[in-house]
Image (cartoon, rainbow, N blue to C red):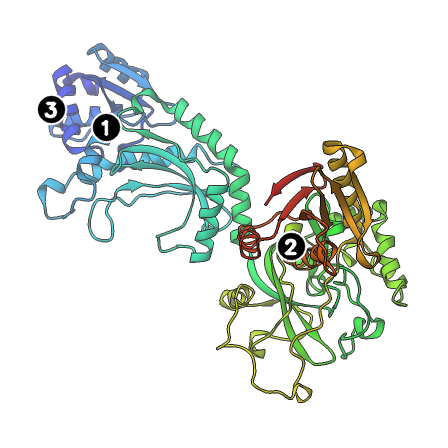
Amino acid sequence: MKLNSINKNHIENAANLIDEQGVPKDHVWSQYFVVVNGKEYPFKYLVRTAYQLVTNEQLQFQSNDSYRSYIENLGFEFRYFEGGYNFFTKEELEFYSSIVNSDYRTNNPEHQYYGQKLYPIIAKAKYWAEQLIIEGFKLRPDNNWVGASSKIVPYFWPKIYSGEDKDVFFNVEVNGKEQFLGYKLEGYYKTQKALPDYKIKIVKEYKELINWEWPKISFDKFHEYNWERLIKESKDYVLKYLVHHNHLKTILSKETKIARITWNTYQWVKPSGPSGKSTNPSFEKDNGFGHEEWLFDSDKAINGIKYGFLEPIHKFRSNYEGKVFDISLYTRDGESNKSFWVTTLKDVQVLTAVESNEVLQHYKNQGWYDEMKVDLYNLNLNSAQLDEWIKEDGSGLFNIRFTATQINEIPTELIPVLDEKDIPSTRYTLMDIPKNIQEKYEVLTKTGFSFENSGSVEADLGTKSKRTASKREIELELKHNILQTKFLKYLQHKYAKAIVKRECTAYGAARIDITRKTNTGFIFYEIKTYNNLRTSIREGIGQLLEYSLYPNVNEAESIVLVSHVAPTDEIKNYLNHLKNFIKLPFSYIHFDIEKEEIITEI
């Protein structure tokens, strides 16, 4: 037998040499490992090294029972690893930690075996990542142990990713600098593939939202693990976070677009008639209404999602199905030929034909489709056109979805487009728009009072164009009635039915939504269901003051505005500022219609 010249001392000497020099990358894989003085060594490479020490010759042989039995008979234990790699060893990790971030020089004799001593870690990290691959994912290994500045890299970071490797991924990690094994869902931050700042912000905010975990196993505790435990726990993590990976993948791959919507003076809650519609040959010119007239009717949201239609999507719907966009909307007044910025809808998803049909059926079941036809009939418009839109499928009426809460944040005033170049075209097409243009108009919606940078010294308004678009804000009547009914019952249950009434009269036959009698006076409640809470505050406080004080009385000891809209931090600050500034016995209540309970009271 070729191995007859090898004895126990030769094997031990070979193991010592491997400790000093490591294992060449082509010899790291081995299903059989020999245990020498408590350490594991790849069988074939260990034997070849021992043979060369004895004979100074290269040994060529195949691993088989006979050769393994010879080594066993010398007094050594064998361990079998199906995947071809033994688990990370204490010696490997300690060596890695000892040289992390140190300089590497090819002409330095002390550095010549760095690669061979790091290859096992690199190979095992790759093997670990391979075990986590699920359908649709691919592997990108991390084989570089020397960085661009010729220093030993602080970690090895193989990753698995789906689609294009450009945004988020799962990675396993052997971190020599901080001395841990870890795995996590991650995004590109500081590498050459770094995401733009606004996408990095999305990833970081999402991490906070989901309580993102980053499991780490310190080097001094890795002995509690083996391949079975490590792979199981890390694969469970991948499966748990897969939904978050897919969501991030979707929103990070979305594009920023701009689209024109039909002119509407009722805030796109319902049709507003032919006035201001396009004068160019088009459906809306011929019929006096467009597809987007109901886009912001939040009374018709389904489980918190608003479904609607955008003509620019309709033209090439098959190309857009399943995609997600941030879409800025603008509109154009046909009378003044002026363009106005409406809002930017985030995470707009394009529906499939099946989804469109399901939404249409829901609308019909709820009677909403008939209500839309009545809206047109009341304006003497041809309601039969809606039936034409849905002859093929529901995509003629519904082709997008977005979270309904966004409607509550839409500015109450249209913003004139500052530069016509900001709008690539006035046609009804889905167009690219730079992120900085979107941000410019988003900033304008938050801009406060300015005397120096706004206004005009001109007195002759008759010679000037319109200051802004005519935009009448529409309160959601159905939601108002539902909220009033449920809030009345809530108060009556809490305080007693006899002392809580609706529609009590105020001066001039005005009617107070709800009045509650107390031991010391009365509390007036005004209910407002505008999409935008600022509008509800603006309208509601004026009415409450009139009910309580006009013409020279003090009828209520406290006045309360009630709405279905959750106040943002900005609105909360505003409400508190209002109360402090004008010393009103005033409060705001956010009442959840579905839960039938008060969520917030300010």
Which of labels 1 and 2 is toward the front? 2
Q: Which of marks 2 and 3 is nearer the N terminus?
A: 3
480 sits left or right of 20 in the view: right
In which quadrant is the N terminus drawn? top left
Q: In this view, does 80 lie above or below 119?
A: above
Label 2 and label 3: CA atoms lie apart by 87 Å
Please tell me which residue lies in front, 296 or 99: 296
Where on the picture, by quarter, is residue 124? top left
Secondary structure of the residue carrying numbered label 1: helix
378 sits left or right of 245 in the view: right
Task: Provide residue 92's location: percent of width, then percent of height.
Answer: 23, 30
Q: Which amino acid does label 2 sit on?
A: Leu
Q: Which of marks 1 and 3 is nearer the N terminus?
A: 1
Task: Provide residue 341's location: percent of width, then percent of height.
Answer: 62, 69
Q: What residue type is labelled 1?
A: Tyr
Q: Which of marks 1 and 2 is nearer the N terminus?
A: 1
| Mark linked to residue 45 | 1
| Mark linked to residue 349 | none
Looking at the image, how many numbered discs can be counted on the residues? Answer: 3
Please tell me which residue lies in front, 382 or 538: 538
Task: Provide residue 227's location: percent of width, then percent of height.
Answer: 38, 24
Label 1 and label 3: CA atoms lie apart by 14 Å
Secondary structure of the residue carrying numbered label 3: helix
Instruction: List the residue tagged with mark 3.
Output: 54
Q: Dot 2: few (<14), some (14–19), or many (≥20) neighbours within 10 Å? A: many
Q: Can residue 194 be seen in this view?
A: yes
Instruction: List the residue tagged with mark 2.
Output: 533
554 sits left or right of 27 in the view: right
Q: Which amino acid does label 3 sit on?
A: Val
Q: Dot 1: few (<14), some (14–19), or many (≥20) neighbours within 10 Å? A: many
Q: Are marks 2 and 3 in contact (CB under 8 Å)?
A: no
Please tell me which residue lies in front, 74 or 310: 310
